[in-house]
Image (spheres, coloured by chain):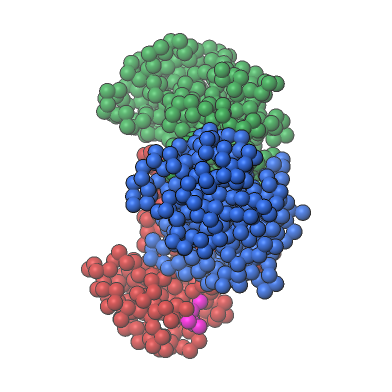
Chain colours: A green, B blue, C red
Amino acid sequence: MHRHLQLTEHGKLKHFLSIEGLSKRLLTEILDTAESFAGISEHQVKKVPLLRGKTIVNLFFENSTRTRTTFELAATRLSADVLNMNIATSATSKGESLLDTIRNLEAMHVDMFVVRHALSGAAHFIAQHTAPHISVINAGDGQHAHPTQAMLDMFTIRQHKKQFAGLKVAIVGDILHSRVARSQILALNTLGVAEVRVIAPKTLLPAHVCSMGVIPLHDMEEGLSDVDVVIMLRLQKERMNSAFLPSESEFFKCYGLTETKLQQAKPDAIVMHPGPINRGVEIASSVADGPQSVILEQVSNGIAVRMAVMTMTLGHHGGAA
Amino acid sequence: MHRHLQLTEHGKLKHFLSIEGLSKRLLTEILDTAESFAGISEHQVKKVPLLRGKTIVNLFFENSTRTRTTFELAATRLSADVLNMNIATSATSKGESLLDTIRNLEAMHVDMFVVRHALSGAAHFIAQHTAPHISVINAGDGQHAHPTQAMLDMFTIRQHKKQFAGLKVAIVGDILHSRVARSQILALNTLGVAEVRVIAPKTLLPAHVCSMGVIPLHDMEEGLSDVDVVIMLRLQKERMNSAFLPSESEFFKCYGLTETKLQQAKPDAIVMHPGPINRGVEIASSVADGPQSVILEQVSNGIAVRMAVMTMTLGHHGGAA
Amino acid sequence: MHRHLQLTEHGKLKHFLSIEGLSKRLLTEILDTAESFAGISEHQVKKVPLLRGKTIVNLFFENSTRTRTTFELAATRLSADVLNMNIATSATSKGESLLDTIRNLEAMHVDMFVVRHALSGAAHFIAQHTAPHISVINAGDGQHAHPTQAMLDMFTIRQHKKQFAGLKVAIVGDILHSRVARSQILALNTLGVAEVRVIAPKTLLPAHVCSMGVIPLHDMEEGLSDVDVVIMLRLQKERMNSAFLPSESEFFKCYGLTETKLQQAKPDAIVMHPGPINRGVEIASSVADGPQSVILEQVSNGIAVRMAVMTMTLGHHGGAA
């Protein structure tokens, strides 16, 4: 399903909604294109005119300043015009349906929707119903997918480990509710890592986790043993003290990443986190700020990956070159 | 009064506050100029440099994401810089008067105020008191006027009917509270249509409606008979269940536009609505999405008309050419 | 301390955090650079490409539409890209620390933080901890400093009085809580005026006011006698009817600037106010709008001064030339 929706008849990226159904070749093309953009943010003039005159709409039904900011910067550095729409507080409050909002923006000749929504499937729904010339990028939908986050993670891993073959990767934390984890697992398996482990208490693992192509583990010592990459997930504090989780300190004791636990991993293992981090909850400050952390590189890479996906879906396939 | 305020001594458009007092020649010039901009939004690069370096302030004292968005896109596509000010939540809350807010923005050397305000006459007041080099566009003031909405409607009618002479137009719904209807009636009569009918229950018609140059009718069958254009108004839901209106379903039964009722109109009649639409309240979905609906064309034309008014008031009279 | 933090090893402006520690030569360089930008806002195309491709972040932890607007316009007229972040309602509400917010924005390769914060020292803290290539401008921190406001005041004084030597300046109102007054006093003394008087009830003067290099006075007649410049401060209405202040009318009677009181000053004295003004509280309308008022010139000059500080801290020292 998703494959057809996301690709043109010539197999090019039209929308970027989820990792599901995308080939290794296409994910690699995204990474290569992002690489061509990675240098631009360090230039004296941080802009290329690739999307000049294009209108990109940040259609955020759920507030996320950080994600919106990275998309806004990516669009601006491609010279596109950006329209920020916080829909939670706008049109739909006048009783307009999602589809009518989309139809109206289409009629204003916009070129791209960057969609953030609390409901899984929202970006797919919009891509299915929007005009043919418009591209849709999923900036996080419910507990379903966050594909640009997954791709910036892949970019960061490739930067440090050169290739995916042979890598052992551990994802730690609230797998059950994480759209980030879902997209990461698909991307890692498509790109051909050796092993993806998910480490969490039973209450935070999906029921059919094994069918996702991962090895579920409940113990950090065992889980981190000999891995090349440790990906910590953000713990949603609102899930604390619920049926899912004991206290913060209890969680940190079992699943928080400390220097001691990290010693189980390979000496050159990298530590990742999608941010914003809860210091002392899922990760110790000494690890977050330590020599193995690549958390801030992930943020930088996020701009390049979003520039790549924006240009590719709008039909520019040469990258910054 | 308004004539002098809106025009320069050479009869050119200086502000765009209401249709009142504007000549047929000038309204036609707006439509012709808009036509020159209509193609730009479909270009590869949707921008012309006509207003480069100009600062346009969206001065919204009343929230309206949709209207603000169309003005922002129009300004951006003319290469102007846009400053969005939501005054409801800002300066005036520090106790500053409207006039002091205006004086301060003038001192920042802005070039245009696009004003939305809940009070009738707000845009006129600002135009009367602002610096000579600044132009003011009324983006809706109380129950008084919404002239850019009226002009995009005229643009859409001319696109489909080629000329205004001989046309019969029906406006349906809450005429009493509608600034849109007031501006439409003035524009239609100035441009010389044959007949403007307003169709509403007595409680939703102004007291002296006949002096507006319209034929008031209370029955849809009679009102829509043989018309070329049907303009549905948005029903403000907050007026429901008040002295003005019975229930939504009651209103829809009498005044909602259905395929059956539409059959009274000419076979090639077009259906318009300023949006956002209340499906099943003032219009059936089958009509809103049907072959006679030009509702989304109105939205597209709104960008071109706003580009026209922005350039004309700032002294560019050649359009996109 | 501040001297080293604000300056490069070559004595150039790196951050602009407070007037404290800056030399007369450097303050004069800011004024001269601002003068080169003053004309640009009156040009047909109000833009110069000096900061094209730079990303300037308006990092506002405290809402201030007016101040944000002037920085946004200054940045836009230098062709920079502006990112508005209202942090009160964003990232930190997800529990992220200030430092993590800064680190993340750094990783997005931004070039400048314009910081507004309710806590004194916030901009200094950020400047101390941010990456070497980033410049920080203090747009008001607690009751500490508001240096761009002070410099636009100095610019306005120089415009009217040509030089600072020999001038007598009176600052009137809530000195105790005013970051504006603190920065003005430092700038006036550094630039070498003859006398700075502060006029306020005892409850609104700092304890060690004399050590600030000012003459404290409690009587307007005496205080305004023979001055060249009268600077009225904004009265924070939330301090009214507290231990600090009697009623508004009582304050106006004693410390409000009227035409009568102004007659004590030199005939060519200018009247200043940082805005927004409370008419009839700290200043009579006839004075605010009268021939000696330069309040709106201050606003205009604010854009030029902010353009100067933005270019200088980012390493452009030639101004608009």
Q: Is residue C256 above or below residue A40?
A: below
Camera-side residue: C98 or A100?
A: A100
Q: Is residue A247 above or below residue C147?
A: above
Quarter containing the N terminus of chain A: top right
Q: Is residue B262 above or below residue A283?
A: below
Task: Please tell me whether the stretch drawn in magenta is mainly helix, strand or loop.
Answer: loop
Camera-side residue: A282 or A101?
A: A101
Q: Is residue C14 left or right of residue B315?
A: left
Residue lying at 57% horizontally and 69% vertically, measured from the top left: B2
Give the magenta range.
C290-294
Give percent across and percent down for residue A5. Answer: 59, 22
Residue B28 lies in what quarter of the image? bottom right
Give percent across and percent down for residue B111. Answer: 60, 63
Camera-side residue: C105 or C10?
A: C105
Counting every numbered tag in the picture gives 0
Q: Is residue A93 left or right of residue B39?
A: left
Q: Is residue C317 left or right of residue B180?
A: right
Residue lying at 54% horizontally and 24% vertically, measured from the top left: A18
